[in-house]
Each structure stands twice: as C-alpha cells, then as structure tokens.
Image (cartoon, rainbow, N blue to C red):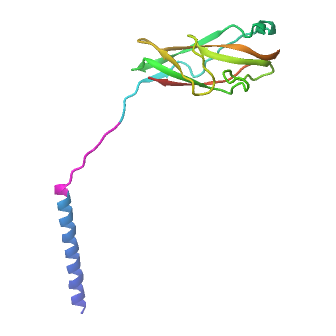
Amino acid sequence: MIRSMRSRITGRRAVATLCLMAATSAACADDTVDFLVRGAIVPACGLSASRVKIDLGTVTAAELTAGHSAWRGASFSGTDCVGVTRASVTVVAPPYGPDRRYIATTGGAGGVAIELQTASGQPLPPDGVTEARFHWPSGQPILAFQARYVRVATVKPGPAGAMAQVHIRWE
C-alpha cells in the first residue's frame, strides 16, 4: 500500500511538472508585450534669491491723502535657465477684507493696504489665481515687481508690512 501511494504521488508530481513546463514554453513562444514610455522635458530655471524685499520706505500720513504712496520696485532673475522664454506668476497673501485686490498689512498702522503689480503694470491681487505673464525672447529672465501703500480708511500711523508668496511657472 505504501508503494502504491508513492507511485501515485510521484505520478502526480510528474504530471504537474509536465503541465507547468508545457504552459511556460507555450507562453514564452507566443506572447509579446508593448512598452509605452511617457514623459516630458520641461523648461527649467533656478532663482537668484529665495526672498525679495520691496522697501516702501517711510511714508507720511499726509502723502496718503492722494490715495496711495509712490510705487517702489524690486526684481529677481532666473538662473541656469534652459528652454525658458516665459513665466506665469501668481501671488498668495492675506487679502485686505473689504477690497481683495490688496494685501492686508501687519503692524500697528491702520487704514492702509498694499497694492502689488508687475513693473509693466499688470495687477497682482493676492488670490493665487490671477496670473501675470512675463516674456523674454532671449537672455536671462528678470521678473520685476512694484508695490505701494493704498489708503483704504482713515490712516493711523505705525509700522505696516506684509508677506506674500509668489508662485512661478516657467514656460
């Protein structure tokens, strides 16, 4: 009886092995696989600075009777740019509540907000959606901005500043 069980087990192993070999050789002989490779090469650019400061200086309350201070500017440039001829820029910052075109100020001053735009005059509200476009056909890209105080209520003297994030999409 033990001998007949061994021969049955051995026989089953042989059949299983033959089935596996037959399935493997048939699969290798007839199958093909198509590889689809995807990707993209995108323009790249570094930044000359990770922080840009626009110094609005000391402005008297009397200067704001006209509604705003003078524009003050700052810029930064792209470095090691490859394939870049344009940039789209958005700004994210806390908006001044009643007029969301402006950036809310921090500090002790009151009745003022900050207006931001490109050096060419494209408004940059702090909504993270409105895009300003920069274009340069050749050379190093320079992204220039300007800001000013805007009177939004009765002016109260004191420090007034803000922080904004500028998001750049190189194209």
Closer to us: 19 or 94: 94
> Image quadrant of residue 125?
top right
The answer to whether residue 127 is above or below residue 52 is below
Q: Is residue 7 left or right of residue 139?
A: left
What main secondary structure does the magenta stretch of the protein show? loop
Q: Residue 82: x and y, percent?
A: 40, 20
Q: Quadrant of residue 85?
A: top left
User: Residue most toward the bottom?
Assistant: 1
Q: In the image, is residue 25 part of the stretch drawn in magenta?
A: no
Residue 158 shows in the view = no
Q: Is residue 165 left or right of residue 106?
A: left
User: The N terminus lies in which quarter of the figure?
Assistant: bottom left
Q: In this view, does 67 lie to the left or right of 129?
A: right
Quarter placement of the C terminus: top left
- Residue 66 shows in the view: yes
Residue pushed farthest front? 98
User: Looking at the rendering, which quadrant does residue 130 occupy?
Assistant: top right
Residue at x 52%, y 24% (from the top left corner): 168
x 71%, y 14%: residue: 149
Stretch in magenta = 28-38
Whether residue 29 appears in magenta in the rendering, the answer is yes
Q: Where residue 40 sits: x, y (%)?
A: 37, 32
| Residue 114 position in % (x across, y down) | 69, 18
- Residue drawn at x 68%, y 22% is 103
Q: How many labels does the image show?
A: 0
